[in-house]
Image: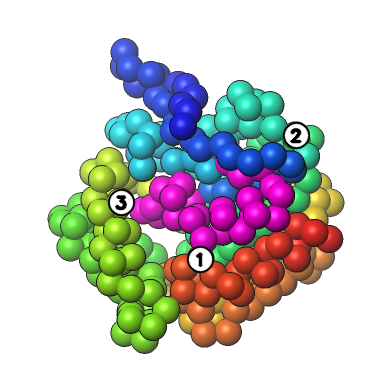
Amino acid sequence: MGRIIVGQENTSDIELYYEDQGAGQPVVLIHGYPLDGHSWELQSRELLAAGYRVITYDRRGFGQSSKVGSGYDYDTFAADLDTLLETLDLRDVVLVGFSMGTGELARYVSRHGHDRVAKLAFLASLEPFLVQQDDNPTGVPQDVFDGIVEAARKDRYAWFEQFYGDFYNLDENLGSRVSQQVVDANRTTANGSAPVAAYAVVPAWLEDFRADVAAVRESGKPSLILHGTADNILPIDSTGRPFHEAFPEADYVEVEGAPHGLLWTHATEVNEALLAFLAK
């Protein structure tokens, strides 16, 4: 629907593809790995029906945005988001992130402020800090992420197939909460991303967001934390629950039995919680 320029790589512009629909208060939806803006399909239509202006965009390296060789870090991702908000002159905006898309929210507030922001929603988030270490005992061991990088570098197509098995908990949900066709479409989207992006984003996931979370908390902006209890990608005991402990003022919703891919498998529950939060 539209493209904005966020930088250059050699002699080529780096462009982000975005879609901007509806009227009313703007809601920007920021997708997860290795998806694109269309992954918000089941949320976008409900938000539009409720009278919101809905903006989705594809992160650099994914979807229809430029397939760059570098810039896969959260300072850059947040700067890209800032350029989008400035270019479209969005104000009183609700920022909604899913999975790695929640990192943009926290980093944006800590680096670029919150003057344009009305509310923030963190869905299946990676905050506050994923890596297990002495001061973060509930985190995930580093060797798990080392294995992801190795698998994605060796054969990203095989890695994506394995990833989506855990993303949707397909052993439990295939055929009931998610169809094979949806899984196939997701894999096609993933396969079309920049080859380097399959593994280059992983170090970004390991960034320590605790200072960014503090900045969000200090902003005083109403926030929502929502997480599935059966998330096998970003386990709730390493993410959602400690995130809420660090940010007790935020609204907090656990979706019982929901996997990481709850935007599709538990769309009704997600949409109800999100719309209720926006209406407050």
Q: CA distance from mark 1 to mark 2?
A: 25 Å
Q: Secondary structure at mark 2?
A: loop
Residue name at image x 68 percent, y 26 percent: 89
Q: Is residue 13 above or below residue 102?
A: above
Residue range highlighted in magenta: 31-55
Q: What colour scheme governs how the chains and residues are painted in the rendered image of this protein? A: rainbow
Instruction: Describe residue 123's horizontal placement relative to residue 218 as left or right.
Output: left
The tally of labels here is: 3
**Circle 2: is it few (<14), some (14-19), or many (20+) Cα within 10 Å?**
some
Q: CA distance from mark 1 to mark 3?
A: 16 Å
- Check residue 235 for magenta coloring: no
The residue that label 2 is drawn on is 91
Q: Secondary structure at mark 3?
A: helix
Mark 1 and mark 3 residues within 8 Å of each other at the beta carbon = no
Which badge, 1 or 2, is on the more N-terminal residue? 2
Residue name at image x 55 percent, y 66 percent: 124
What is the three-letter code of the residue carrying label 3?
A: Thr
**Circle 1: is it few (<14), some (14-19), or many (20+) Cα within 10 Å?**
many
Residue name at image x 51 percent, y 37 percent: 19
Which badge, 2 or 3, is on the more N-terminal residue? 2
Q: Is residue 268 above or below residue 206?
A: below
Where does residue 262 sit, x and y in percent of width and height?
50, 70
Q: Quadrant of residue 161?
A: bottom left
Q: Is residue 76 above or below residue 215?
A: above
The residue that label 3 is drawn on is 189
Where does residue 181 sit, x and y in percent of width and height?
28, 67
- Check residue 40 for magenta coloring: yes
The residue that label 1 is drawn on is 263
